[in-house]
Amino acid sequence: MKPYYFAILAAFVWGIAPVMEKIGLKNIEPLSGVIVRSSGIIIGAIILGIFNNNAFRLALKADPKTIIFLFLGGITASILGQIFFYNALKHGEVSKMVPIAATYPLVSFLLGLLFFGESFTIIKGLGIGFVMLGVFLLR
């Protein structure tokens, strides 16, 4: 399957999740919502490990640097980012909060330039400009 198809499927699934989460946050505080959501992630990861032992074994054999960075990424995105996102989602409109939160590639883009020496092109610059314009229009 081509990478673009995976990206489209991810966008579709990620587009559905905030609607379910907005409904779920109606009668619960965002921090409690993150705990419930994280429990679902843990259960899902265990199920994936059960059905794909090879992936689980390979994860356990990963070098310490890999484990540390993936673990930190999980804390950063799945805990801290989710707390901020759930606060926005609980108190804001899904149609505004989701697109604004989804501008995280701007941060990744800048960090990619800074830490990985990735190239800046006119096309990338235009894409970033359009993302920023979209946020401006949603405010």
Image (spheres, rainbow, N blue to C red):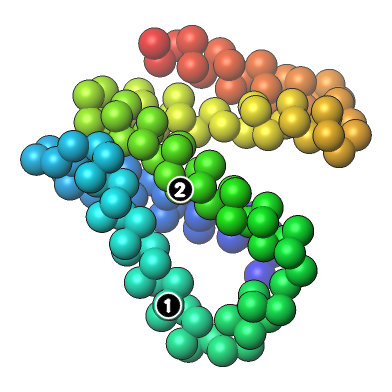
Quadrant assignment for the C terminus: top left
* Relative horizontal placement of residue 123, taking residue 102 as reference (left or right): right
Vertical order, 81 against 129 (above or below): below
Disc 1/disc 2 C-alpha distance (Å): 17 Å
Q: Which residue is at 45% across, 38% downward?
A: 80
Position above or below: 12 against 128: below
Q: Position of residue 20 (x, y in %)?
A: 24, 49
Instruction: Determine which of the numbered discs, if any, sits on residue 78 in the image.
Output: 2
- The answer to whether 32 is drawn above or below residue 43 in the figure is above
Left/right of residue 92 with respect to residue 109 in the rendered view: left
Q: Residues within 10 Å of mark 2 (few under 14, many from 20)?
A: some
Q: Amino acid at mark 1?
A: Ile
Residue under the point 40% across and 15% down: 138
Marks 1 and 2, the one that precedes in the sequence: 1
Q: Nearer the viewer, residue 45 or 102?
A: 45
* x, y percent for residue 51: 48, 88
Tell me, yes or no, if residue 21 can be seen here. no
Q: Which residue is mark 1?
A: 46
Q: Secondary structure at mark 2?
A: helix
Task: For the N terminus, give its image quadrant.
Answer: bottom right
Q: Residue at x 32, y 63 (%)?
A: 40
> Looking at the picture, which amino acid does disc 2 mark?
Ser
Q: Element at badge 1? A: helix
